[in-house]
Structures are given as C-alpha cells and as structure tokens.
Image: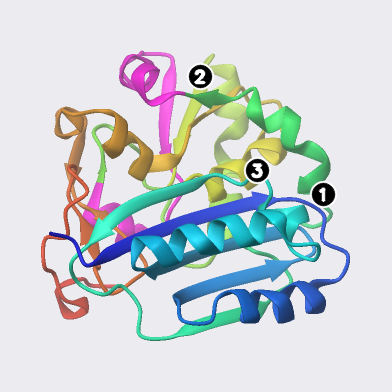
Amino acid sequence: MSSGVHIAFYRFVRIDDVAAVCDRLRELTEGLLGTILVAGEGVNGMLAAPSERIDAFIDEAAADQTVGVAFGGITYKRTDYERIPFSRMMVKAKQEIVPLGVDGLDLPSRVDDVAATDVPPHEWRELIRRDDVVVLDNRNSFEFEVGRFRGAVDPGVVNFRDFREYVESHAEQWKADGKQVAMYCTGGIRCEKSSPWMQDLGLKVHQLQGGILNYFKEIPDADADFDGECFVFDNRVTLDTNLRDVGRQRSDIDG
C-alpha cells in the first residue's frame, strides 16, 4: 500500500507578481513536501503528501485569487510512493522555470504553437520508428545513460546551453536530409520550451505529450521502446517503466 501521492506539474503562463505568488504558495503548501519554482514565464513543481492533502492543495490553488492564474486548469501527473520523495518544502522565485539559454523567448505567448506538435503516447511508438525521424533526448547526458527510448540521440548536455548548441549545429543537415525531430524529456517541460525556438529554425518538431512519465503511465508495454529506467529529481531516484520505485540510491547514479 502506498504511503502517499506525488504530483508533478508545470504551466507556462504570464505571472506579473512573482513575489506575491511565492508568498501565497508558501501558505498553501504548509504540511506538504516538495519544490515549486515560480518565474514570470510560469510555474514548475513537484509535491508529495497523503492523497487527501494533495487533493486539498489542488482545489485551493485552482480557486485562489493570487495563484489561480497559474493553477486553474493546470495538468498534474500523479504517482503513488512508498519512499518519501522529499525532505522539505521549498517555494522559490527564479528567472526561468526551466533554463534553455535562448534569449528573448516569450513562451506564454507561444503555447498554442507548441500544442500543435504534441504526440499522444499511443502514437509515439510508430513515430519514433520512422526512417525520416531523428529521436532527440532533451535531458542531461547522465539521465540519458540511466534510461532512454531505443534509437534516441544524446545531445551531450551538461550545461543547459549545450542543447541549443547541438540543435543549431545539426539543424541544417536535418532539413537537408528531410528529417523531422521527435523530442522527449521527463515530464514535457523542456520540450515545450524548446519547441517554438526549434520551429523558428525551420525544423518540423514533434514532442511526446507529457514526457516519459506519461508514456509509462499510458503504455503497458513501454519497455518495448524504452531501455533502462527514468531518472526523477527526488529521493526515489529512478522509476521503471511501470512507474515503480526500484530502490536506487543517489550513489548508484553517476551524475
């Protein structure tokens, strides 16, 4: 029996008063564990608690006058846990909720553009097996080593700007070869931020809807396409293709 519920979420939406949103979230998350990042471009976070406390937060945040602009209609990815994922609660203001290293990218105004590139999990398997598709992992290299979709390319990301440089150095050849890009990350946020910029480079980009974790949730035989485990940024360390904590320790992962 699980001891609680873990939720992961993000939303690109314009936030004018980041400090006020942070202050209110600190009140609403009392008694929870996890991290929420807040920036002018949106929110990104993970929380853990007994299910009734998580449900209460979801309802309160959506209806709240201060934070409802970000949390009303937000999508949550839920998994049960046995091992407590976090040791504290932190709400933090940031310049970006996920860094990309591209200046002047106004994500909240581009959400509709990005949505058109989403590929549902049940269509992903066929897409990544096509000869005209480059399967691109949009995560750090150590995450790629822990687990990846079969046939995926590792862009060699150590610093967040490495991904930008890799794409820029390959974009013209991909276009010349008639290649499309099928891109994925853990929960979708990196892909959603990268897609508009890559489209501006003239690339045809598809992104896995909801990321690896959503694929594991929706596809019972995900291990037919995915080798290894998915690294997660909490105390569970990795999840297998059935979303189970396999009991790794941080020392097991070379980061």
Q: Earlier in the sequence, mark 3 or mark 1?
A: 3
Rendering quarter of residue 224? top left
Label 2 vs label 3, nearer the camera: 3
Q: Position of residue 79 (x, y in %)?
A: 31, 52
Mark 3 belongs to which amino acid? Gly
Residue that carries the numbered disc 2 in the rendered image: 179
Look at 79% across and 50% down and name the residue there: 105
- Residue 106 can be seen, yes or no: yes
Q: Is residue 128 magenta?
A: yes
Q: Nearer the viewer, mark 3 or mark 1?
A: 3
Location of mark 1 (residue): 106
Disc 3 target residue:
73
Q: Is residue 225 above or below residue 194?
A: above
Q: Which residues are magenta?
A: 120-147
Name the residue type under label 2.
Lys
36 sits to left or right of 213:
right
Q: Is residue 179 magenta?
A: no
Q: Is residue 194 above or below residue 171?
A: below
